[in-house]
Image: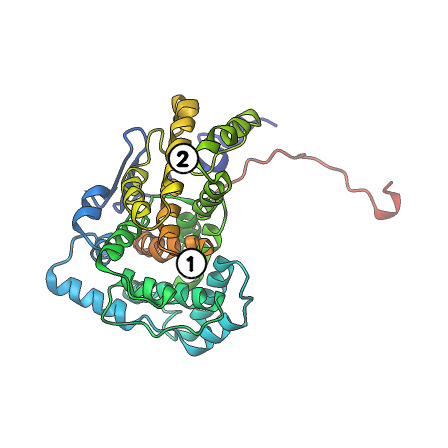
């Protein structure tokens, strides 16, 4: 088939690689420089100076909040945390040992049935629903974490910030200030990352004006995949399998020989160090030194050294998933909850980009490059052999 005739002035890129699908002022990734900004603010500055709530406000509304604005936003997040009892009941009916992201996807889809404002289509209503979904995502993650242990869900603590309350609902223990700061930093780093698979999935659904709950559920469905949200759990399994730093060389030699992908390395956009990995490595160093997991950090250092030496010339370096799992595991978080934690942060980016796109909405309707037959003769069933 004449591909040029079919495509005209369009171009074909498998996986939509480097295809521009919208305009945005929310987040920008410079893959060559290893640079990530939210609304013009470098991610390192936000981790150092901001909080999850403040960065969430910035991401959604486009500016740093004044004191009263942040107080109102934080108050809304706190007031919207509770889940309807029927949704808790649905979570309890799901398998305790099932995939946590499957449970989160199911619970969040059900939430839409209990919000009588869910089918309103004006921008202000979608904004309010979006804030509600950010708040409820953390509570749903906490409820699923408790269910996996056979425990009842905890009532959200309005005295705690978003991150501290999330950690409390998962473990039943209120985190200290340092743990809250480290995990808050990790949450900030995962808020947005331009047009990734889950963000695009949520925006594509929203572009049909389905509803915000359907759009966020689509994001969760995409994030579940091991090529997107599940990579840090895979990294941790690799580190645990290696066991000690002295075994890393043999493990990697085997992986290199079989041309196997090393989890936590490489990125579709970054051709240098992922700036999120640079920040998380410092936190992993600190946290592992004080929580009995130093051996995992030492293995990670060895793996990083070997993989960068082997593949760095091809632009393959550690990404955000390589060090985050060490931090979570060091704090006693079940590896099965790593991707739900990602969702509890990335929901902010989904909401922000959906709201931005809806201001000038156009239904996503890409084309496919047809490579089949153009002409076929129909054969009656009785004559087919």
Which quadrant holds residue 82?
bottom left
Q: Nearest the camera: 214 or 367?
A: 214
Q: In the visual, does 2 lie left or right of 37?
A: right
Q: Residue furthest left?
A: 67
- Residue 346 in view of the camera: yes
Residue shown at 21% from the left, 55% from the top = 51
Mark 1 closeness class: few <14, some 14–19, many ≥20 residues within 10 Å: many
Q: Quadrant of the N terminus?
A: top right
Residue shown at 35% from the left, 56% from the top = 347
Tell me the element at label 2: loop
The residue that label 1 is drawn on is 215
In percent of width and height, residue 190 lies at 33, 49
Name the front one of labels 1 and 2.
2
In percent of width and height, residue 345 lies at 33, 55
In percent of width and height, residue 66 lies at 11, 59
Q: CA distance from mark 1 to mark 2?
A: 25 Å
User: What label sits on residue 267 in the rendered view?
Assistant: 2
Q: Residue furthest bottom?
A: 85
């Amino acid at each position: 088939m004449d591909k040029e005739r079919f495509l005209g002035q369009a171009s074909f890129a498998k996986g939509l690689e480097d295809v521009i699908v919208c305009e945005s002022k929310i987040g920008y990734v410079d893959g060559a420089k290893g640079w990530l900004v939210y609304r013009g603010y470098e991610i390192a500055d936000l981790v150092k100076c901001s909080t999850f709530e403040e960065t969430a406000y910035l991401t959604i509304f486009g500016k740093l909040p004044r004191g009263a604005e942040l107080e109102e936003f934080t108050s809304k997040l706190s007031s919207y945390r509770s889940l309807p009892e029927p949704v808790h009941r649905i979570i309890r009916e799901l398998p305790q040992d099932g995939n946590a992201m499957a449970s989160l996807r199911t619970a969040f889809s059900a939430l839409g049935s209990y919000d009588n404002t869910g089918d309103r289509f004006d921008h202000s209503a979608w904004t309010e629903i979006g804030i509600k979904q950010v708040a409820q995502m953390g509570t749903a993650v906490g409820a699923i974490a408790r269910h996996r242990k056979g425990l009842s869900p905890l009532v959200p603590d309005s005295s705690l910030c978003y991150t501290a309350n999330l950690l409390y609902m998962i473990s039943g223990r209120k985190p200290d200030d340092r743990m809250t700061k480290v995990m808050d930093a990790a949450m900030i780093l995962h808020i947005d990352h331009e047009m990734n698979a889950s963000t695009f999935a949520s925006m594509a659904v929203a572009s049909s004006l389905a509803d915000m709950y359907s759009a966020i559920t689509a994001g969760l469905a995409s994030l579940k995949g091991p090529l997107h949200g599940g990579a840090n759990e895979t990294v941790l399994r690799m580190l645990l399998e290696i066991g000690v730093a002295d075994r890393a060389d043999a493990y990697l030699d085997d992986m290199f020989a079989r041309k196997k992908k090393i989890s936590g390395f490489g990125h579709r956009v970054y051709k240098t160090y992922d700036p999120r990995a640079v920040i998380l490595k410092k936190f992993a160093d600190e946290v592992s030194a004080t929580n009995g997991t130093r051996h995992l950090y030492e293995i990670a250092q060895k793996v990083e050294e070997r993989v960068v030496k082997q593949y760095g010339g091809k632009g393959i370096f550690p990404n955000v998933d390589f060090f985050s799992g060490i931090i979570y595991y060091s704090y006693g978080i079940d590896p099965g909850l790593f991707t739900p934690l990602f969702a509890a942060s990335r929901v902010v980016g989904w909401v922000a980009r959906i709201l931005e796109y809806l201001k000038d909405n156009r239904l996503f309707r890409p084309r496919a490059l047809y490579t089949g037959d153009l002409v076929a003769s129909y054969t009656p069933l009785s004559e087919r052999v």
